[in-house]
Amino acid sequence: MSSHREAPSVSKDPVADNTDVYAFRTPGDTVTLIACYLPGQSPAGGPNFYEFGDDVLYEIKIDNDNDAKENLVFQFRFKTVNTNPNTFLYNTGPIGSLNDPNWNRRQTYTFTQVTKKDASGRRDRDRDRTTVLGTDLKTPPVNVGPRSTPNYEALASAAVHTLTHPTTGQTVKVFAGQRADAFFVDLGSIFDLGTLRPFQGAHVLPLPGVSDDGVDSLAQANVHAIVIQVPIAMLTSNGSVPTDVMSPMSTIGVYASASRQRGSTIRNGQRTSMGPWEQVSRLGNPLFNEVIVPLARKDEWNSTDPSGDSVFAPYVARPELARLLPVLYPGVFPNLAGLDADRADLLAILMTGLPSGVVPGFQNYTGPTQADLLRLNVAVPPAAGTPNRLGLVGGDPAGFPNGRRLVDDVTTIELRAVAGLTYPLVAPSYTADGAAAAIEDGTFNNPGRVLLNDFPYMGTPYSGYSVGT
Amino acid sequence: MTITRRSLIGGGAALAGAAAATLASGGTTNASAPIELSAQELAMLDIPVMLSVTDAKRGDMEILIGEQAITFTDKALVAKLARTSRKAVK
């Protein structure tokens, strides 16, 4: 999956497991940023339904001066309360509102902006500046079922908070809670020796007679999402709304993380944490840690900052998957098999952004510092019509790897890039194999996947009562 | 003062109190000297605290308290911790 249970340590700590990050332009000169956690939720999660961790620091980080270090951080801290000490139930009747006394187990959160001391425009550079944007913000309940949460959409809508920035007066929207996972991937097939079901007849270990249809492993899974919508002017280093796609000031780098305090104890059933925050999970580009970084270094990667990612660059330059494809699909990737050079295309896409001159009229270059950041050129307007699921590779510069939209088929995009489709961008004499433009896992057309047209854009979570029926 | 494995790893204020007292006394420990904590010190340690030995050979330790880590060096205290810990692993 994009980053669901992608590393040994965090796979045992789902509350802190950052699964996906999205960043895309939205109406009104805004950007929507989404960070998802708590992967693979079975909607029937009772009696202890899924929730954010009170002992986890969730953050969305923005680099806006091209040094791969965050200048702006959005922090989220949750607080959980039981309102009824005499029941084992999550709710003792239908939950009709976010104040309903039937709802026993509730979460609220504090939403804080931290402007780092080295950010442009700062006069007081001695310390980071913290601005609380909202306190006691309510999350919705999980989608238990039609008797417990009969009008789920109304509950979720009530948990969309529109805030006014106390310093700038800018409007910020925020939502935190359960959502249908927007990511899609044939996990069961891909991790069974790299099988892509639509092409399994060409696999070195064919299984005659089985279906070629992709199976979305997340088709009925929920996640917990933090979604914010902020003015572009709040994200750029000089407070502008860039319109020049080719300007270096137009691109921001985004990643999300989860941190736990260094020390913790358990006594009398109570866990207590103390000490500085230590990052245990992070995510910029989808699948980076999942597919690029070797298993033995995944935990290390999660604990480090993107600005130090040059140590992982060799795994991007010579990706293991590019060596595996010709072996797993004999004769299908002859040109890829013969490609013995550092993959400057992948290094640009994933670690520096694409410089000008590679794709006509487009760039999202953030300088030479190699870092796994999701880079969004905010001067590129949203797609005028139906977004192309292949994003930039499909001729749609509003999509991945220019940020990432919920509709972007990032598994297919990255598969094709690794297979050599994008290498001619930097080496025109190289001819990509025909299969590089065709391979995919076949999950894009999952009919159950639902997105919303408006904030928070991710679909209503699957109901615990309905899934599996 | 009795140092138990529980107080060592358990977040109790006792051990950190000893460490703080040690720091206040110039970095030495004296098992026979009575240690009296002031009301202010007791109040300061009325939240979970953890002491961690980060480099025993150098005598480096850190106190985890709140969202901070305070590092200090006290070889004598590390030696005392080692001797006390030995009882726990017999």
Image: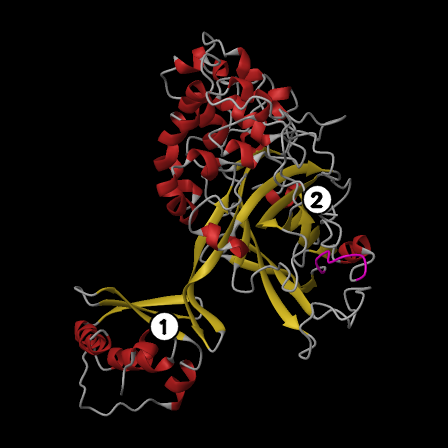
* Secondary structure at numbered mark 1: strand
Q: Which numbered marker is on residue B50?
A: 1
Q: Amino acid at mark 1?
A: Met
Residue A15 percent coordinates (x, y): 54, 56
**A4, B8: nearer the viewer:** A4
- The magenta region covers A141-147
Predominant SS of the magenta segment? loop
How is the protein colored in the picture? secondary structure
Q: Nearer the viewer, residue A255 or A381?
A: A255
Q: Quadrant of residue A251?
A: top right
Q: Which residue is mark 2?
A: A458
Q: Position of residue A18 (x, y in %)?
A: 53, 48
| Amino acid type, callout 2 | Met
For the point 58% across and 26% down, the residue is A197
In the rendered image, residue A200, in percent from the top left (x then y), is placed at: 55, 22
In-image side of B20 versus A79 (left or right)? left
**Mark 1, chain letter?**
B
Mark 2 and mark 1 on one chain? no
A223 relative position to A59: left or right? right
Query: Residue at point 44% right, 70% down?
Result: B66
- Above or below A322: residue A145: below
Number of numbered markers? 2
Query: Disc 2 on helix, strand or loop?
Result: loop
Q: Quadrant of the N terminus of chain A?
A: top right
User: Mark 1 packing: few (<14 Cα in 10 Å), some, or many (20+)?
Assistant: many
